[in-house]
Image (cartoon, coloured by chain):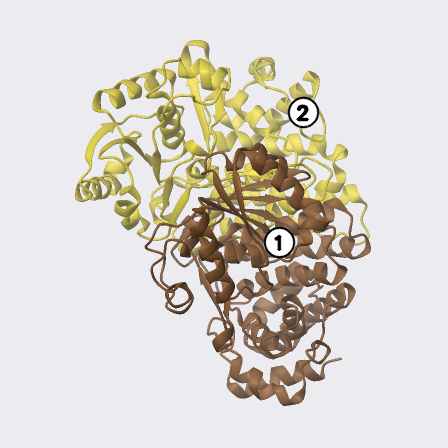
Chain colours: A yellow, B brown
Amino acid sequence: MLGNFTYHNPTKLYFGKDAIRNLKSALAPYGKRVLLVYGGGSIKKNGIYDRVISILHEAGKEVYEDAGVMPNPTTDKLAEGIARARAHGAEFILAVGGGSVCDYAKALAASVYATCDPWEEYFVNQNEPTCKTLPVGCVLTMVGTGSEMNGGSVITNPAIKQKNAHNFKADLFPRFAILDPTYTYTLPYEQMVAGIFDIFSHVCEQYFSGEDDNTSDYLMEGLLRSLIHSSRIAVKDPLDYEARSNIMWTATWALNTLVSRGKATDWMVHMFGHAVSAYTNATHGMTLAAISLPYYRHILPYGVQKFKRFAVNVFDVDAAGKSDEEVAREGLAALEEWMRTLGVAMDIASLGATEDMIEGMADATFINEGGYKILSRDEVVAILRESLLAK
Amino acid sequence: MLGNFTYHNPTKLYFGKDAIRNLKSALAPYGKRVLLVYGGGSIKKNGIYDRVISILHEAGKEVYEDAGVMPNPTTDKLAEGIARARAHGAEFILAVGGGSVCDYAKALAASVYATCDPWEEYFVNQNEPTCKTLPVGCVLTMVGTGSEMNGGSVITNPAIKQKNAHNFKADLFPRFAILDPTYTYTLPYEQMVAGIFDIFSHVCEQYFSGEDDNTSDYLMEGLLRSLIHSSRIAVKDPLDYEARSNIMWTATWALNTLVSRGKATDWMVHMFGHAVSAYTNATHGMTLAAISLPYYRHILPYGVQKFKRFAVNVFDVDAAGKSDEEVAREGLAALEEWMRTLGVAMDIASLGATEDMIEGMADATFINEGGYKILSRDEVVAILRESLLAK
């Protein structure tokens, strides 16, 4: 814990089968006029919508709706939501969905009383709200982003093709989140494994950085071991409650600020992933998967000790009689084996990327400075091409 | 995560060297009249008292004092504190000290406006406060109990020789805690290692229970590995900031409710420890140390798989070619080696226990039912005697 830091995470989590039964009491401290925010309507098919509505009515709430939140919520949608929230005098925002819906709800909560342009203020200038904000609650239906217990929000401005993030302070963390692992059962297999790899990547982005020996590193090794173990069960039996519930819990703790305390972080795989997404519209978790091995194999020589530690402590690689670099490379080989078991994307070509996109994707890749090697543009191109040609 | 649960921990932590500089802003939301609670006056010797007083004055607070909180805070002391808090119209309680001071502050916060007898209401009948409670903040000067980020409070009623605990809900968790690892540098060596073993025991009490395969188990293995690693550095160089800061952070997460989510817990070593303390007045962490190996060796046959997992995942025991029980026993041998490196108590005789106390200590040992074996009274006696005669 070499760095000084603050930790504050007041989100109350209700976890487990039928955790939705806590919704009524969770809503009790808040106002009567609830804006229900959700996505494309899958919650109407699986019954979650009906259950939520019935609890809201039972709780005596007036319910207003803001549906149609898209996977990458836009500034236009945000403007629409602000108008709705103002028209109905919303006092509470209830997000029912995955990370995008939850991200959007936080942006909306910060914007209903704002006199500024939220895009400029929060997502470009990275200011905190100075206006009144609305409390947010969340009923989670997808696993991976960790948005249910942090202040993260990502909004896309389609007019200028920019996708920006803001990490709001604790006031805008969801006041509560309802996490029922069985709500994730209806996700298609591909979304399940993309979510699993997203979780894995969140941890690795915070793990592969810094030379210190931090409690956070040990906690992250625990999260990764749990995730790898449970995912091997879930890919065989997606209805295994123990596996799916451990995955859901791991996702929350992978990105709720705990494991980054007191240490440096990288986030370079996400920078690549965003650039690949911009050109291919591929699923976020799959872009991270396709980039991870080429990137980590490239930077391994600059962080051999940490990659060796990863090999031994996460994948149980036997270090006896091997050089540090051999052990480190065996760790990435074990990672590759695990990824192939999941069936995640191993290359960006399979996501629709082509050679003529490489230069543009390289331009769109923001270069962070927290990892073991600050990449040159040539290295960015090389890593993208490596992924394009990977088999 | 087989069990359903709620997780809610709103304590804001300021961590690192000179974290006390955050005290002024941390206090800003609260009232002017601050009751400063502390122990025997060591904070006057090491300069922490002067620093806190100067910040309180700078913040424009009126400061009233409630000093002399003893290692096992009593109902009499609590009555005195209630009278002081009422006389001064205290609006905020600032605890400066270790776990006892923090425990006491929470009990006091729940009692100032209570019309009931706090001992009966909270510590015997285990009710939650229905009256107004005061907010508590904490400046931590000792490491081990985790009281800085939970609702735990232990109060002793000397008239009936009972020491009872209550876990208050999130309202009474400290609103903030200031954790400066350098504040723990002045602790005597014995208190440092007793604190380290207390942390270790907190994790083990939650780890050695249940048959499920829970993310919490992986997180606990991470905490234990971090603690063992850092403690080996700290015993050689107690002023190693990285080691001491990791130990401090581990202590907080060992007992802030996270790692018990969704799983069963044991707490039997603490039951023995309390009984031994009652007869010998020995340091809490040392009683836990003296009991742990006899207890764990006794219950090992009933939880072989978990003890094997502990051996491999915490102490890196090589399992190849060995029976499960051999691996499990090697784990406890590795634990013994670590304990001897720390220099903690290995037997209750060295803490002042004698053969004629055994029956009385057995009577005073409350038998929990969450561990791998529900102990008979004969087993309790056997474990106590095993520790008495251990070398």
The correct choice, above or below, for A13 with respect to A71 in the image is: below
The answer to whether one can see residue B323 in this image is: no
As drawn, the label of residue A369 is: 2
Q: How far apart are marks 2 and 1 (CA)?
A: 28 Å
Tag 1: amino acid = Leu
The correct choice, above or below, for B353 with respect to B288 in the image is: below
The residue tagged 1 is: B223
Residue furthest front in the image? B87
Name the spot of residue B263 as percent of width and height, x first.
46, 61
- Neighbour tally class for label 1: few under 14, some 14-19, many 20 plus, Cα within 10 Å: many
Name the spot of residue A189 as percent of width and height, x first.
41, 41
Q: Where, quadrant-wise, is the N terminus of chain B in this rendering?
A: bottom left
Q: Which residue is drawn at 45% across and 59% down?
A: B167
Q: Where, quadrant-wise, is the C terminus of chain B in this rendering?
A: bottom right
The correct choice, above or below, for B242 with respect to B375 in the image is: above
Q: Which residue is drawn at 45% across and 56% down?
A: B83
The answer to whether one can see residue B41 in this image is: yes
Q: Residue at x 70, y 79 (%)?
A: B352
Which quadrant of the figure has residue A70? Answer: top left
Tag 1 subunit:
B
Q: Which of marks 2 and 1 is in front?
A: 1
Q: Nearer the viewer, residue A369 or A324?
A: A369
Q: Which residue is drawn at 68% across and 49% down?
A: B44
- Neighbour tally class for label 2: few under 14, some 14-19, many 20 plus, Cα within 10 Å: some
> On the rendered structure, is A351 left or right of A386?
left
Tag 2 subunit:
A
The correct choice, above or below, for B391 with respect to B314 in the image is: below
Local SS, label 2: loop
> On the rendered structure, is B268 left or right of A192?
right
Name the spot of residue B261 as percent of width and height, x first.
46, 56
Tag 2: amino acid = Glu
